[in-house]
Amino acid sequence: MKKLFYLSLLIAVFGCTGKKLETEDAKKNNSEKPELPPSSSSRKVIKEKDQLTVFLVSNLVKNKPRSINNQSQYCILDKTEMTSIRYTKRTGTLYKGFEYRLGKINVIGIKDKNPKKLLKAKTVIAKGKFVKDLTGKIDKVGKCKVSDFPMYQMRADWGSPECGTTPGITTFKKLKSLSYFKIYDLKKIDFIKISKTQKVIEVEITNNLPVDLPQLQFKVHYEIGPGKPQPHYEKYKLPPVEKGESIKKQFPLYPERKGSVTKKKKYYRLDSCLIKKKIKTDKTIVILDLNLSVPDSK
């Protein structure tokens, strides 16, 4: 009886061990199997995304160290110090940023070493792509103080995406959250002409873009007073324009409201005109980001 008992026990132990070894071998074999390639639908999505061509139509601006809206340098403080920067002599690390931007977007890849013509142009068109995280394109310069940067009485419509209403002062966290535009091709484009007379603003758009234009919002920016100037905006609509076509539209030089502007035109100063729009097709994205001055008609 004892022999039978020990024999049964040995069979049970070796049987369990065998199953365990078999299971471990199976897991090992499964882990060594090559990873399956993505499905055809996944490959299609990736391929279509890579094929999208991005165009940015805007104004080329040269960044400056102490600018309110387009800084070329950043004083980066510790995260814990940002709450009281206006009232203390805080120090940080100074970084050199980007040399140019299109509208509000920092750019790299301008091949022309002296792009004066592009800076003077009303509008330019850039072909390229957006790249996340500005910190990979900034260089450490030295130390900085908050007092080195101007502390203006800022307005809500002033400032840059990197620094907001604290010109030149920012954090790594903020810079990492933003994108810059890598330019492959950049040239002047005769897309829009704006002029004014004593009564109207005249707008002419020639659609030499790679897409049809939908209806656009045309925003006129005034500075109004007396006293401290404040921004005022009037919004109008521009009709759709197909590729290769042109339109001309006229809008009132001053807002037309009863009892207000007609008596106080001297308090309204025409500042600029704005057009912002993102147009997406199957293979193209066109971003309009225009802030245009208005010269007098000849």
Image (cartoon, rainbow, N blue to C red):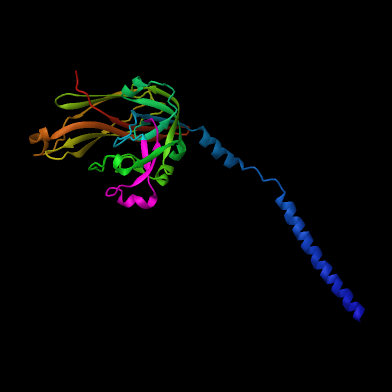
Residue lying at 9% horizontally and 34% vertically, measured from the top left: 262
Magenta stretch holds residue 94? yes
Residue lying at 35% horizontally and 51% vertically, measured from the top left: 81
Please indicate whether residue 124 sits to the left or right of residue 157 in the image: right
Residue lying at 21% horizontally and 32% vertically, measured from the top left: 271
Please tell me whether residue 53 is drawn above or below residue 37 in the rendered image.
above
In the foreground, 98 or 132? 98
Whether residue 162 is visible, yes or no, is no
Please indicate whether residue 47 sits to the left or right of residue 239 in the image: right
Please tell me whether residue 68 is drawn above or below residue 126 in the rendered image.
below
Q: Position of residue 11 (x, y in %)?
A: 86, 70
In the foreground, 228 or 8? 228
Please indicate whether residue 31 sits to the left or right of residue 243 in the image: right
Magenta stretch holds residue 221? no
Please tell me whether residue 2 is drawn above or below residue 188 in the rendered image.
below
Residue bounds of the magenta highlight:
73-100
Whether residue 129 is visible, yes or no, is yes
Where is the C terminus found, in terms of image quarters?
Answer: top left
Please tell me whether residue 67 is drawn above or below residue 166 in the rendered image.
above
Q: Residue furthest top?
A: 298
Q: Position of residue 85 (x, y in %)?
A: 31, 48
Task: Give the image quarter of residue 139.
Answer: top left
Task: Give the image quarter of residue 213.
Answer: top left
Where is the N terminus found, in terms of image quarters?
Answer: bottom right
